[in-house]
Image: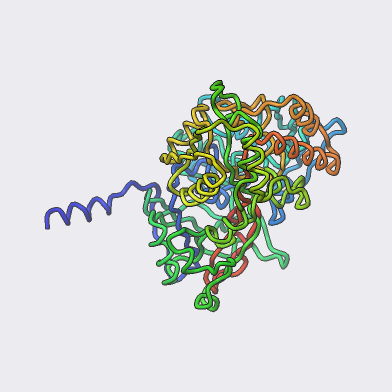
Amino acid sequence: MKHLIIICLTAFVAVSCGKGNINDNKQIFRYNESANISSLDPAYAKDQAMIWADLQLYNGLVELDKDLSVQPSVAKHWTISADALTYRFTLRSDVYFHKSELFKNKNNTRKVTADDFVYSFGRIIDEKVASPGAWIFGNVANFTAENDTTLVIRLKKPYAPFLGLLTMPYCSVVPKEVVSHFGKDFRCNPIGTGAFRFKMWKEGVKLVLVRNEDYFETDEQGNHLPYLDAVSISFIIDKQSVFLEFVKGNIDFISGIDATYKDEVLTRSGNLQPKYQNKINLATEPYLNTEYLGFQMDNTDTGNPLQNKKVRQAINYGFDRKKMMRYLRNNIGLAGENGIIPKGLAGYDSTAVFYNYNPQKAKELLKECLQNNASITLATTAAYLDLCKYIQQELIDLGLNVKIDVSPPGALREQIAQGKSNWFRGSWIADYPDAENYLSLFYSKNFSPQGPNYTHFSNKQFDILYEQSQKETDVKKRTEMYKRLNAIVMEESPIVILYYDQVLRFSQKNIEGLETNPMNLLILKRVKKH
């Protein structure tokens, strides 16, 4: 009995930030976050769990719509100079921070001004803050407030995707007086401008956000957003338990699907099983996430067969991606035959098939270059072991001696970043909606660990064209450049594209307005719960 009391007390006093209860009669949208949230400070919004929460709490100058077009948010409109170096934003005058006693006035709030953005952006590049989003402003010469409603950003050199970068949660506006007061504890005392404001957080247990009554956006009929009264986020780690809670109606929404219940819910073709069709909704859309296998291109071991382009090309030809998708993924996603750029971005070309299944071609390439008994090792995590075992068997049938090394996710990421893995499974989810984000993985000046070029691919022709594409403001011309860059990468084969992922969203029948988008951003300000 003593142990039981201690356990109950421990649960009761779980680490929490904020206080208060929410009325169970309110319209509360409930979802689970299996990956824990470590901070509600947008300066550290580096993963999906934090990004989803921050999207409810904060706004930036601009935002993405469901089609990934850049739209106004706190900025009403903007202009770009003829030389593409100066961006001038005109701000709305009706955007207020969430209420806080730290605002020294009778309303406990104040308007957002251009100076707030100067402070917020300066904070991101402050080395003491150590924000993982500091790279966003690497090409920025300065940002200045001409007056309360005019913000000017000047770039060092033209950069076509810059507006897309500003849609990232890192670029949210925060109030200096509140951040200065809380310091590091701003992570659990967030004040933003978003559709929902912070209510309470028991870390690892529950996070509650409530409707911001002073939110500035309205719908087409003039009704104030958001419609929901609150958002409640739980933190159940076991995904099968989450699914059971969803089936019981205790969770309103699930994103993605786990192998433990994949076949229970979906048919082989990726549709809902008949018994669920009248109980839940399923929404799907191409996801800007490319899953791949990467090769370490600057390995100095001359006996490593993966340094030979023909071996890498043979691996690309050597397994059936469509069969893999059908039997191991229930056709969730598209077979990766069209290069690094996923469907949904300018530069993706469904007619450009670089590597389809051609075992005869693979055998011919291997016969030309492979030494007897050559062995290669593929590094992966447990979550992708089934895919890697499938590829292993397909390549063994071609005469390749393939071994698999399974590591924890954190350990594998460190190995890849430090260039200690010759062949590894990786993925890239878009940070911003431009193919340049994917092509940056092969720019020689982005070698890891300083940048995202984990394969250490280096090609002079690629680098020249990549730099030209960053300056090109004509969308059609830039798209053609992206296609040529994609072709250069696939010819040299520093990677094997596995598949382009798919957004998969399950929701209860009483949820309305939960739209999908290719970056799987969770936008709740227009959601209704009947």
Rendering quarter of residue 510: bottom right
Of residues 160 and 398, which is closer to you in this image?
A: 398
Which quadrant: the N terminus? Answer: bottom left
Residue 435 found in image quarter = top right
Q: Is residue 458 above or below residue 504?
A: above
**Quadrant, the C terminus:** bottom right
Of residue 2 and residue 323, the one placed in the foreground of this image is 323
Location of residue 336 in the rendering, given as x and y in whole percent from the top left corner: 65, 49
Percent position (x, y) of residue 516?
Answer: 63, 60
Looking at this view, name the residue that lies furthest to the left: 1
At horizontal 52% and vertical 52% (from top left) the residue drawn is 197
Total numbered circles: 0
Q: How is the image coloured?
A: rainbow
Give whichever of 517, 286 is nearer the camera: 286
Locate residue 454 relative to residue 165 in the image: left or right.
left
Left or right, 464 with respect to 383, comes to: right
- Residue 156 place in picture, x, y as percent: 75, 25
Image-quadrant location for residue 303: top right
Q: Residue furthest right?
A: 82
- The reply to whether residue 94 is visible in this rendering is no
Residue at 66% x, 30% y is 137
In screen coordinates, is 214 left or right of 9? Answer: right
- Expressed as whole percent of the image width and height from the top left, the position of residue 370 reads 59, 33
Question: At 47% across and 41% down in the image, what residue appears?
Answer: 380
Above/below status of 522 relative to 166: below
**In the rendered image, is residue 402 in sight?**
yes
Examine the rendered structure and indicate whether residue 164 appears above or below residue 279: above
